[in-house]
Amino acid sequence: MEAEAVAAAYRHLHRGDDRAALLAAITDALADLDAANRRVEVHLRQISRGYVRAAIAER
C-alpha cells in the first residue's frame, strides 16, 4: 500500500510520465542509500575510536 502511494506521488509529480517518475524514484532511493551508508561509516569510525581510547585508558 505504501509503495503504491509513493509511486502515485512520483507519477503525479512527473505528470503521468512513468519513465521520469521511475528514474526520479530510483535517483532519490540511491541518494538516500548513499546518505545512510555515510552515516553508518561515521558511526563505525566513532565506535572504533571509542574502543581505541578505552584500550589506551586501561593501560
Image (spheres, helix red, strand yellow):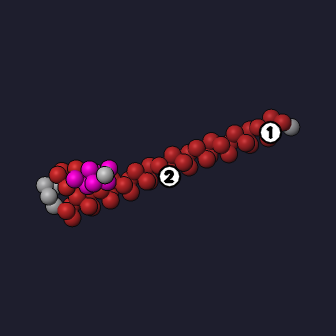
Residue type beneath disc 1: Ile
The picture places residue 22, in percent across and down from the top left corner, at: 26, 61
Q: Is residue 19 magenta?
A: no
Query: What is the magenta segment's predominant secondary structure?
Result: helix
Q: Residues within 10 Å of mark 2 (few under 14, many from 20)?
A: few
Q: Nearer the viewer, residue 9 or 43?
A: 9
Specify the amino acid type for callout 2.
Asn
Q: Quadrant of residue 47?
A: top right
Number of labelled discs?
A: 2
Residue 33 against residue 52 in the figure, above or below: below
Which disc, if any, is residue 29? none
**Disc 2 to disc 1, C-alpha distance:** 29 Å
The residue range painted magenta reads: 2-8
Nearer the observer: mark 2 or 1; the answer is 2
Task: Spot the residue most to the right.
Answer: 59
User: Who's the residue at 22% across and 58% down the image?
Assistant: 21
Q: Quadrant of residue 42?
A: top right
User: Which residue was labeled with disc 1?
Assistant: 56
| Residue 52 picture location, percent across and down | 74, 43
Image disc number at residue 37: 2
